[in-house]
Image (cartoon, helix red, strand yellow):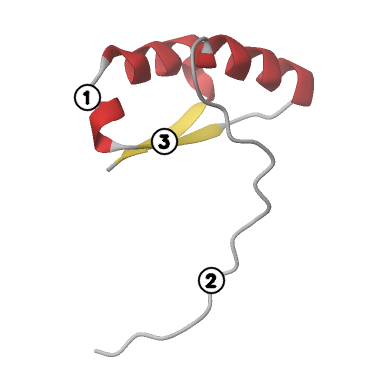
């Protein structure tokens, strides 16, 4: 089956990285009023406590995680 098409990526407003990412995301969720987050990270980061800490800090605001 041959696939073809075009995907237009939505505007990326920010790229957050480094220490205290969980704190920055929680503050940004309150300031910006966003309801849900989809977290995209590498497999190596996904296998560390960092991702678990971010997901825990955001609580029910995490809509999904891709670590690959």
The quarter of the picture where residue 67 lies is top left
Of label 1 and label 2, which has the lower sequence position?
2
Which mark is in front, 2 or 3?
Answer: 2
- Crowding at label 1, few (<14), some or many (≥20) Cα neighbours within 10 Å? few
Q: Provide the secondary structure element on which disc 2 rests.
A: loop
Q: Residue 7 at x, y = what percent?
A: 53, 71
Of label 1 and label 3, which has the lower sequence position?
1
The label on residue 64 is 3
Left or right? Give the position of 23 relative to 50: right
Mark 1–mark 2 distance (CA, rounded to whole Å): 29 Å
- Crowding at label 2, few (<14), some or many (≥20) Cα neighbours within 10 Å? few
Which mark is in front, 1 or 2?
Answer: 1
Of label 2 and label 3, which has the lower sequence position?
2
Residue for badge 1: 47
Left or right? Give the position of 29 relative to 43: right
Give me the residue at 64% from left, 29% from top.
35
Residue for badge 2: 7
Q: Provide the secondary structure element on which disc 1 rests.
A: loop
The front one of 8 and 60 is 8
Q: Are marks 1 and 2 in contact (CB under 8 Å)?
A: no
The front one of 59 and 16 is 16
The quarter of the picture where residue 23 lies is top right
Q: Is residue 56 above or below residue 8?
A: above
Left or right? Give the position of 10 relative to 4: right
Q: Residue 18 at x, y = what percent?
A: 49, 19
Mark 1–mark 3 distance (CA, rounded to whole Å): 16 Å
Left or right? Give the position of 28 relative to 25: right
């Amino acid at each position: 089956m041959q696939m073809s098409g075009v995907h237009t990526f939505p505007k990326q407003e920010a790229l957050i990285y480094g220490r205290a990412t969980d704190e920055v995301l929680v503050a940004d969720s309150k300031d910006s009023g966003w309801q849900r987050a989809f977290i995209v990270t590498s497999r190596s980061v996904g296998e560390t406590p960092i991702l678990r800490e971010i997901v825990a800090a955001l609580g029910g605001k995490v809509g999904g995680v891709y670590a690959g």
